[in-house]
Amino acid sequence: MNRWSLWAITGAAVIAVFITFVALSRPRFRLAVPSPTVKCPIVRLEPSTLDIGNVEPGTEVKCSVEVANDGDGVLRIANLRTSCGCTTAILADTQLASKQLEWMSVSFRAPIESGEINHLITFDTNDPRRPHVSVPIRGRSSWQVECVPGALEIHGVAPNKDHTECVELVSQASYAFSVRNVSASDDQITVAADERVTEGRRRYRVTVRSNSVGQHCGYVSFTTDSVRRPEIVLPVTFWVEEPSLVSPRQVIISSAHPGEARFVALKIREAPLDFSRDNISLETEDAPSGGLPFRLVSAAIRRIGNSANAVLVTLKIEVPNREGYSRGIITINGLGSDRVVAVPVAALIRAKSQPISSEDVGED
């Protein structure tokens, strides 16, 4: 084989390899083959929310929800649940064929107290768009005539002093009613009608009074001409508390520097005329290790108000000279009948922040 024949064979081989490479590197085009249609269920609810409106407390409400399958596949329903024991939901058929509908029976008992109703019915489906379905139940439990607020809790009543709160009898949808009689459980509670009367609304002033320190419980009874609510009982609880002889009852000193002096003001409701600096002391209960205790630097006393017995005491207190949490007690004696009042003191002590020098700040 001569030289020219060898070159011809080599050239033909190179061309064949090139053509094969180009053919293999070109994208392959194929006809798209449509995939078979997947039959999917579609769940539909009517109504999607159960609004039961206003119902009387304790009333049983029955309603229904239409559950339909608007898709082509079989709709499967599982894990039907309610958010509380006062609600039940029953669905007889949990597998719905295409275009089939079923009624879900819902039974609900309103709470015996007045208030908003918010509950939920939930279930799972094989609808790929709605795997978890919820049906809210909304409404309000309320009497035809009810008292607002439904109960009175009164704190901080001074001994042998009147304390008055206002309540209203309110009807739903301006229902006309009249109050035939009002009474209280005992003589510590009195009730007076307010002259401002509007349609569907009556206002009353409830006054409590007792000279006995502690908790007191009673009630106010309203008799109405309402067939549904002939009697309304308003529970009344109040606490009679002896006014604090010294206020505030505790002193908190926040973010003080070690050894810093702070001013603290105390008001004493009844102090004898000979009350002086000698009747005040300051002791340390807990201080950072190695630090000095609290120190009472000075005390200024002056009479205030119309009463000659009330005084304002301004104390200058030096906190411990170590960082940390410190506790102390201000003791006040000589207030008559050998009475001694202890006022807790708490201080959070932190070191002063060090200024940043120019050497510590880098330049951009």
Image: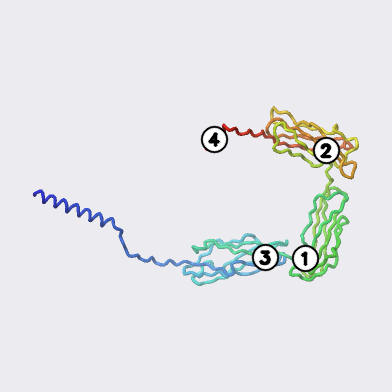
* 80 sits to left or right of 269: left
User: Which mark is first along the chain, 4 or 3?
Assistant: 3
User: Which mark is first along the chain, 2 or 4?
Assistant: 2
Q: CA distance from mark 3 to mark 1?
A: 18 Å
State the residue position of label 1.
170
Which amino acid type is marked by label 3? Gly
State the residue position of label 2.
313
Q: Is residue 279 above or below residue 232?
A: above
User: Which mark is first along the chain, 1 or 4?
Assistant: 1
Marks 1 and 2: in contact by CB < 8 Å?
Answer: no
Q: Position of residue 75 (x, y in %)?
A: 50, 66
Q: CA distance from mark 3 to mark 2?
A: 57 Å
Marks 1 and 3: in contact by CB < 8 Å?
Answer: no
- Residue reaching furthest left? 2
State the residue position of label 4.
362
Q: Which numbered marker is on residue 139?
A: 3
Circle 2 — which element?
strand
Between label 3 and label 4, give the one nearer the viewer: 4
Q: Position of residue 232 (x, y in %)?
A: 80, 63
